[in-house]
Amino acid sequence: MIDPDFFPEGALVGVLTAQPLDRLLDYKAPVGGCQLGAFVEVPLGPRKVLGVVWGKGRGDFDIKRVRSVIRVLDVAPMRGEMRDFLRRAADYTLTPMSAMLRLATRAPGLGDAPSMRKVYRMGHGNVSRETEARGRVMAALRDYGGLSFTLGELSDMAGVTTSVVKGLVKQGAVVEEDSPRDLPFARLDPAYGGKALTADQAAGARALASGVRAQKYATTLLRGVTGSGKTEVYLEAVAEALKIGRQGLVMLPEIALTAEFLTRVEARFGTRPAEWHSGVTMTERRRVWKMVGEGEAQLVVGARSALFLPYRDLGLIIVDEEHDTSYKQEDGVLYNARDMAVLRASICGAQVVLASATPSLETWANAEAGKYNRIDLASRYGPAVMPAMRAIDMRDESLPSNRWISPTLQRAVEARRARGEQSLLFINRRGYAPVTICRACGYQIGCDHCDARMVEHRFLKRLVCHQCGETKPMPDVCPSCEVEGKLAAVGPGVERLSEEAAQVFPEARIATLSSDMFGSARALKAEIEGIAAGAADIIIGTQLVAKGHNFPLLTLVGVIDADLGLQGSDLRAAERTFQLMRQVAGRAGRAEKRGETMLQTFQPEHPVIRAILAGDEEGFWSAEADGRRHAGVPPYGRLAGIILSSPDAQEAFDFGMELARRDGPLRQVGAQVFGPAPAPIARVRGRHRVRLLVKAPKGVALQGAVAAWIAQMSPSNRLRLAVDIDPQTFY
Ligand code: ADP
Ligand code: ZN
């Protein structure tokens, strides 16, 4: 019988490469032939590039000039399901296939032959003559609990020369050994370490497990307040996938959360799973990629890009904190990992679990409409109860200017301190102060490349643009009027709040947590563990602390500015504020003591603030849903954003005008275009930005219409056009 998926030597094949070309390239199959989906190396001009055999060649190219595939790589061919997924994800996001292939091959050295190499791990010998450098090597090894590293990785991690490591090998404190390059992962044991579940939890776990056993696609919203045991429940679904021999993927929104999570997986299944995110070494990445493809990694814990790994048989995808905005990739390929997880699962017959205490309105609406199943965990596990919520009406508080901790909040913190409990003061703003103004002329220091104000970071002793990352030293004189000593900070950021707290609570131990204050995920993890163990009385933090960390001694959360998120004109401003406030509140009172959350607000009667205080989630969602339905916006309508950018503002604007004029293909499907308008941040990195917004009724084939619409015009070399399907942000 002839295998239709096999191409014998010399047959024409069409190869997809990761090069930015918008077509497949024809090659001849190499000696020994090649399989459909095979990863191959092909010549392209003077270079050799990675590609995938995507189908038959087109044969419309001079056959004498068609070159041969150089070799077939020693990795599992890309499965039909994966090719399908990439194709449909490309269609959905209007992304070229080459970019999708890049996402799917983000591991170095895929083509290298399996071989041995030297690796280094902790030995039993003692370190003689403990120097600081030697100490750092040992600390790095300890941090990763028994893992092995290459010489380069270990010396980089510890910031020492390779000779330091070699010296430790001589002493026996570090062991050098030969190891195959890519080892399979240890088997997870589904019967190890399960907990006795509450009735609620057990019912949820049973429902998820039977979905996994069915090996068919379905998505389930797993809703429950922080601490209700969602993780325990979905780990039972993972156990079921392991039992039937299918792979699992758990996506987390934040790398800082993985360490804690991996420990939980180890406690539940006896060993650690594969890990995939930007903090993982290149060698380990390659190992994960290959082992996932061979079915030798049963469970992957990772960031959104873990969705593009070549699973051999993916049966379950968990999207933890599914409402988190970091699931939306905002540069390069603009995709929402939550939605792509649903797409991938629907192709490979897998279950999706979307876990959250505060689901996105999209997910809530899909569950309402019956498209998703829904499991609710009603209460917190054990004695912990939801914190009491109250507003502090800032109109009634007397506070000097440049102070943000109200007397009421101050008293509440002091009461906690007296009892040896922790308080969290939350402000969702990095840096010292959002605005630096000259008191002589009124000038505000802005970024030279963006239409954004520079934010003072005292910790770094610099001004930072939160748009482009540009920094400059804090000047002594006003750049505009040149008067000296009149530059003043306006408004609070997390660093300034720390400073105030240090004055207001001079005796307290204060820990500040903001993403830009820690050089590495490891340093942050260490800080968080210290705090959880009681190393601070007061925690000052940004959004970073809202995400899933466990602080058992914490009983008070004070939100410094609950109105902050409500000011934007963003479609999701209310939703985001509601979620964030609920998440932050969820940090308090996780152990035996009841927590309390206080919101400082100037508008306690605002409907969103009232819904937060009342804890009326269903009420909030249905009111928000009504508003969106009425306006015909997501999830009850569809949106696509077009962002044009160019060094020349006029060019971007003219192009946008012309696009808006030629809106025939959009009107045909009942879609409307708005704009062009300068984007809310009209200049980023020296490029002027113009936006158009396409709005369509739900159910229309929006992507096709948008593709046909923009295909009418070709941008110049200087002009960039990006399409953002289902945009989450509008800047
Ligand atoms: P969530 O994911 O909803 O925030 P977790 O699964 O993290 O909740 O549970 C919160 C805490 O309660 C964790 O420390 C967890 O181990 C514990 N816990 C939850 N359910 C149980 C249970 N049935 N038995 C023992 N401990 C549990
Ligand atoms: Zn900038």
Image: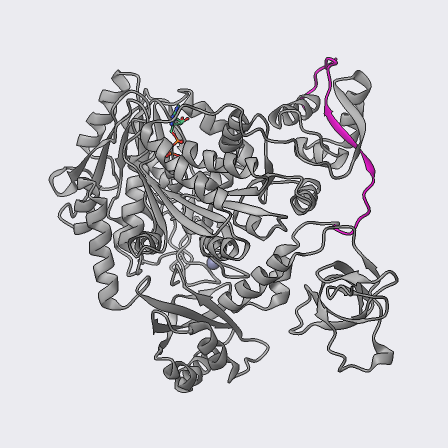
Residue 657, position in %: x, y? 41, 83
Asked if residue 55 is positioned above or below residue 669 in the image, the reply reads above
Quadrant position of the C terminus in the picture: bottom left
| Residue found 30% across the figure and 66% down from its top | 633
**In the image, residue 126 lies in the stretch drawn in magenta:** yes
Decide if residue 8 is on the left or right side of residue 146.
Answer: right
Query: Please, is residue 32 above or below residue 251 in the view?
Result: below
Q: Position of residue 530 (x, y in %)?
A: 46, 23
Q: Is residue 412 left or right of residue 22?
A: left
Q: What residue is drawn where x is 39% and y is 43%?
A: 355
- Where is residue 333, by image quadrant? bottom right
- The stretch of residues the image draws in magenta is 110-132
- Is 85 in front, or is 386? 85
Quadrant containing the N terminus is: bottom right
Q: Residue furthest front?
A: 1
Percent of width and height locating residue 301: 55, 40
The answer to whether residue 226 is above or below residue 686 is above
**Residue 380 spot, x, y in % from top left:** 30, 30
Instruction: Indicate yes or no whether the magenta region holds residue 618.
Output: no
In which of the image's four quarters is ligand 1 placed? Answer: top left
The residue located at (79%, 64%) in the rendering is: 42
Which residue occupies 75% across, 36% down?
Answer: 152
